Image (cartoon, helix red, strand yellow):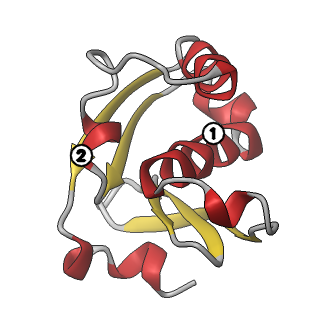
Amino acid sequence: MYTDAEKTGLESVCLQFDDQNKPQVCSYMSLATFDAQQKWHSYQLELYAIGIGFRQNETLFLQSEIEIFTDTAVCVALEKYKPMNARETRLIEYFSQFNFKVRYIPARMNRVADAL
C-alpha cells in the first residue's frame, strides 16, 4: 500500500503482485480533509491515511503481510512512536491487528499515491 497525505486530502493505493510479479491495483482511496483535519500535523494525516487504507481493505489485509510505503518518518518508526492523543492511540491500536512493515519512500518517488 502506498499512502500520501496533504492538508487538502489523503490518498492510498493498494497493489497486489500477480504470478509474473507485476503489480495489480486492488483499490484506490482519495479523501478530502475537513477544516479541522487541515490543522493536523502532516504525520497525523499520514497515520489517518494508513488507517483509512487498512479499513478499506480490512478483509484482505487481515490475512496478508502488508508493506506500506510512506514519505513520513514518524510512520516508519511506529513501533517506537508514543501517541500524542486519544485519536493516535486508537489508530495505533487498530494497526496492531495487522501484519505489516512500513518502509520509507522519498516524496518525489511516491508517484503511485501522488497521482491521486
Going by the image, does 23 lie left or right of 33? left
Q: Nearer the viewer, residue 11 or 57?
A: 11
Q: Residues within 10 Å of mark 2 (few under 14, many from 20)?
A: few
User: Residue 51 got which mark?
Assistant: 1
User: Residue 93 got which mark?
Assistant: none
Locate residue 6, reporting x and y percent.
52, 72
Where is 74 relative to 36, above or below?
above
Going by the image, does 32 lie left or right of 2? right
Q: Secondary structure beneath disc 2?
A: helix
In the picture as drawn, the residue positioned furthest to the bottom comes out as: 115
Locate residue 79, reporting x and y percent.
30, 16
- The residue at which mark 2 appears reads as 73
Kindly report which numbered mark, 1 or 2, lies closer to the viewer in this rendering.
2
Q: Residue at x 49, y 87 (%)?
A: 115
Q: Quadrant of residue 62?
A: top right
Residue 43 visible in the picture: yes
Q: Residue at x 58, y 12 (%)?
A: 97
Locate residue 93, reporting x and y percent.
60, 13
Alpha carbons under labels 1 and 2: distance apart: 16 Å
Q: Nearer the viewer, residue 79 or 37?
A: 37
Locate residue 73, reporting x and y percent.
24, 46
Going by the image, does 61 lie left or right of 19? right
Amino acid marked by disc 2: Ala
